[in-house]
């Protein structure tokens, strides 16, 4: 993994970032065009994330940038969640920074026209094209893209209450609509359809989980009995799995998780995934544990799932990723004192 700083902003670049750039530019072969393409993608995505980071810094955060498969992410690290207006500006800053880079490349081409077919002509053309396409894609009103976060911030600013469920349903519809439009206009594009399909699935799961949480907040008395049943099911499954793990009976432990998941509902599903993550952690399969814990957190944002993800990533050697998960755990309500007292997690707390 490559680590460096751009001004005050730490940047981590994972190998998958470069591999995904190669996949996206497969048509360029393996000569100078591929090298130039990777350079363009690297600079364009980094500038995009720096747009988020600069605004995050202005708003009082301590941003960190991570470039990973098929893009990047900026962790602003605010002490408290930003208000909708600030979140809107923060999300909009990335695409704007990318477009400014494209305009700069266009201005250079107009002022100093490169020789046709030269490396500089190829680079400038790619900078202009990538900047426009990347900004347009990110501005789609689909979570977790910047446009989706802008939409969520706008809706919550108007409604003045959490609106993740509504924004996720809108994102689901938009994912399917864009997939249909892309297919009709350009034909079936495997990468576009894969990404839009993943967005649709993620937003469906997120919408169900958020809707369940919002119903609980609006009418706690009506769902108290259901919550008690679900929590009892989770507690029973955890106890069965714990007993099986003490015997090193991994099959029985997995069976307990499967029974829990078959009960239905996002709370049980998230708990079952978290339980399976713990089982894989006990087996020593840290990568699978990290993936399962992340899936659990995406359905139901519990501190326990984030802690398991942090522990699994730390054991897998991904300390930066572990730190990010530990921050999510603290944001989700993990007791800071307990984290600092944990002999394993204290090293990254």
Image (spheres, rainbow, N blue to C red):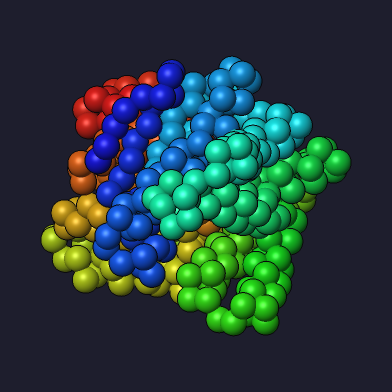
Dividing the picture into quadrants, the one containing residue 94 is: top right
Dividing the picture into quadrants, the one containing residue 173 is: bottom right
Q: Residue at 39% across / 63% down in the picture?
A: 25
Q: Residue at 43% across / 34% down in the picture?
A: 65
Question: Does residue 184 appear left or right of residue 343 in this picture?
Answer: right
In the displayed structure, 183 sits above or below 14; it is below
Residue 60, x across and y down, in percent: 59, 17
Residue 143, x across and y down, in percent: 62, 54
Q: Between 225 and 190, which is closer to the camera in this rendering?
A: 190
Q: Is any atom of residue 51 visible in this view?
A: yes
Q: Between 97 and 31, which is closer to the camera in this rendering?
A: 31
Question: Does residue 279 appear left or right of residue 163 in this picture?
Answer: left
In the displayed structure, 46 sits above or below 28; it is above
Q: Where does the N terminus fall, quadrant-wise? A: top left
Across the whole image, how many numbered discs are drawn on residues? 0
Question: Does residue 44 appear left or right of residue 196 in this picture?
Answer: left
List the single residue furthest toward the right. 158
Q: Between 190 and 339, which is closer to the camera in this rendering?
A: 190
Q: Where does the C terminus fall, quadrant-wise? A: top left
Dividing the picture into quadrants, the one containing residue 2 is: top left
Residue 157, x across and y down, in percent: 81, 38
Q: Is any atom of residue 217 visible in this view?
A: no
Residue 304, x across and y down, in percent: 41, 43
Question: Does residue 184 appear left or right of residue 298 in this picture?
Answer: right
Q: Between 108 and 49, which is closer to the camera in this rendering?
A: 108
List the single residue furthest toward the left. 248
Q: Residue at 56% across / 25% down in the picture?
A: 54
Q: Residue at 49% across / 46% down in the picture?
A: 114
């Amino acid at each position: 993994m490559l680590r460096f700083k751009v001004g005050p902003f730490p940047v981590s670049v994972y190998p998958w970032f470069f591999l995904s750039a190669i996949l996206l530019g497969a048509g360029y072969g393996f000569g100078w065009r591929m090298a130039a393409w990777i350079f363009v993608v690297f600079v364009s995505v980094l500038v995009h994330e720096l747009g988020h980071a600069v605004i995050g810094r202005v708003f009082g955060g301590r941003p960190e940038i991570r470039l990973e498969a098929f893009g990047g992410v900026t962790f602003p690290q605010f002490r408290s969640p930003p208000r909708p207006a600030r979140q809107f500006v923060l999300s909009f800053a990335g695409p704007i920074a990318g477009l400014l880079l494209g305009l700069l490349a266009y201005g250079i081409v107009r002022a100093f026209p490169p020789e046709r077919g030269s490396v500089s002509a190829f680079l400038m053309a790619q900078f202009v094209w990538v900047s426009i396409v990347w900004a347009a894609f990110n501005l789609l009103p689909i979570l977790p893209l910047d446009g989706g976060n802008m939409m969520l911030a706008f809706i919550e600013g108007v409604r003045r209450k959490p609106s993740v469920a509504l924004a996720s349903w809108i994102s689901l519809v938009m994912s399917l609509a864009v997939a249909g439009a892309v297919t009709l206009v350009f034909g079936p594009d495997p990468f576009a359809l894969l990404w839009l399909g993943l967005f649709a699935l993620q937003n469906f799961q997120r919408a169900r989980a958020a809707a369940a949480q919002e119903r609980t907040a609006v009418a706690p008395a009506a769902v108290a009995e259901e919550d008690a049943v679900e929590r009892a099911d989770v507690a029973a499954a955890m106890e069965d799995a714990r007993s099986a793990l003490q015997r090193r009976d991994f099959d029985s432990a997995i069976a307990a998780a499967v029974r829990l998941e078959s009960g239905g509902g996002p709370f049980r599903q998230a708990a079952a995934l978290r339980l399976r993550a713990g089982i894989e952690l006990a087996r020593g399969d840290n990568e699978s544990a990290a993936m399962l814990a992340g899936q659990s957190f995406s359905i139901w944002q519990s501190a326990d799932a984030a802690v398991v993800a942090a522990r699994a990533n730390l054991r897998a050697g991904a300390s930066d990723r572990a730190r990010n998960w530990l921050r999510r755990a603290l944001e989700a309500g993990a007791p800071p004192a307990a984290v600092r007292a944990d002999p394993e997690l204290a090293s990254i707390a």
